[in-house]
């Protein structure tokens, strides 16, 4: 019995390398997929549990509330930013990332005071999300109600 | 089964956003803002509702779902109140998430300090 030759191993390593180093996009996409999917799965577990207790809309609303809490708490502990470092949009796009975008600057600017620091900076990213979300939703709703009835 | 769909759809939406960030070098904040608006448009086209029915939290948790909730709330309230529903529906439907962000965001910022 012989162990696999070094030549094959080298070839394999070269092949693996060719997939890895030159394309961080591939790795970033995979990490975003896995972490984003995992966060959504956690949300689904909470939603499934709440659906056994209450009507659908209430369960959905309470699930987002729970996820916002989780995102905010993990950001406070410093864990969420670690996840975000390798998961990118996998951590930023779910509603936990929205909570992260609220807590991070609020915490960061605490030394500037509780009014102009914490409260003013809380919505540095969340503010634009709410403003453009509301305006585009308004536009879409107007089109749905009055133009393409 | 919904658990698997939630994982796959939620993961796919995040992967898509990541590709946009990597390929266009866009600031993630711009992608977050765009995602809400895109979610609103997909909702208006009647495409996002079925996705939420199919993937549950996998479609509702990413920020596209926030745009979808805004539109759904506006159309619901417009059904009851007419045009004035456009002023009440969006924030009514998303109130719990926003209030949670204010409560927990403030609380965590007061309790914790940034690392490093």
Image (cartoon, coloured by chain):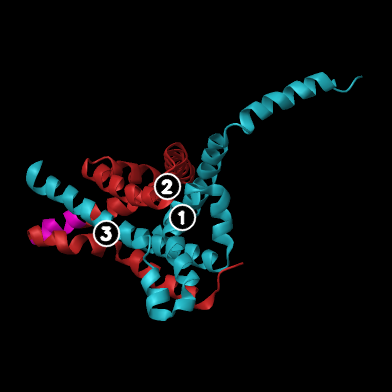
Q: Which residue is mark 3?
A: A131
Q: Is residue A80 left or right of residue B99?
A: right
Q: Quadrant of residue B101?
A: bottom left
Q: Is residue B112 above or below residue A79?
A: below
Figure colour of chain B = red
Instruction: Check if residue B78 falls in the magenta segment.
Output: yes
Q: Disc 1 to disc 2, how far (Cα)?
A: 8 Å
What's the chain of the residue with tag 1?
A
Mark 3 belongs to chain: A
Secondary element at image label 1: helix
The magenta span reads B74-81
Kind of element beneath mark 2 = helix
In x, y percent, where is residue A68? 43, 63
Q: Circle 1 is placed at which residue position?
A: A43
Is residue B88 visible to the viewer in this orientation of the structure?
yes
Labels 1 and 3: the sequence-earlier one: 1
* Image location (x, y in percent) of residue A60: 36, 58
Horizontal relation, residue A134 to residue A127: left or right:
left
Residue B35 - label:
none
Q: Is residue A116 positioned above or below A78 on the image?
A: below
**Are the residues at dot 1 and dot 2 in contact (C-beta closer than 8 Å)?**
yes
Query: Mark 2 — residue?
Result: B58
Q: CA distance from mark 2 to mark 3?
A: 24 Å
Q: Residue at x 36, y 61 (%)?
A: A126
């Amino acid at each position: 019995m012989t162990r696999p030759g070094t030549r094959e191993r080298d070839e394999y390593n070269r092949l693996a390398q060719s997939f890895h180093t030159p394309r961080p996009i591939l790795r970033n996409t995979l990490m975003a997929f896995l972490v984003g999917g995992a966060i959504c799965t956690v949300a689904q577990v909470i939603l499934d549990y709440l659906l056994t207790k209450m009507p659908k809309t209430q369960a959905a609303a309470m699930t987002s509330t729970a996820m916002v809490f989780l995102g905010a708490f993990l950001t406070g502990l410093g864990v969420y930013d670690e996840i975000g470092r390798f998961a990118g949009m996998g951590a930023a796009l779910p509603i936990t990332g929205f909570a992260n975008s609220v807590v991070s600057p609020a915490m960061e600017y605490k030394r500037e005071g509780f009014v102009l620091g914490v409260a003013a900076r809380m919505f540095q990213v969340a503010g634009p999300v709410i403003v453009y979300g509301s305006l585009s939703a308004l536009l879409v709703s107007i089109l749905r109600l009055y133009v393409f009835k | 089964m919904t658990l698997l769909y939630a994982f796959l759809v939620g993961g796919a939406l995040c992967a898509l956003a990541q590709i946009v960030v990597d390929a266009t070098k866009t600031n993630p904040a711009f992608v977050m803002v765009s995602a809400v608006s895109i979610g609103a448009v997909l909702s208006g086209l009647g495409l996002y509702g079925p996705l939420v029915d199919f993937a549950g939290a996998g479609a509702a948790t990413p920020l596209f779902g926030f745009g979808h909730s805004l539109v759904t709330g506006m159309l619901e309230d417009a059904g009851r109140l007419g045009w004035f529903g456009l002023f009440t529906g969006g924030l009514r439907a998303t109130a719990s998430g926003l209030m949670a962000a204010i409560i927990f965001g403030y609380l965590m910022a007061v309790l914790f300090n940034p690392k490093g």
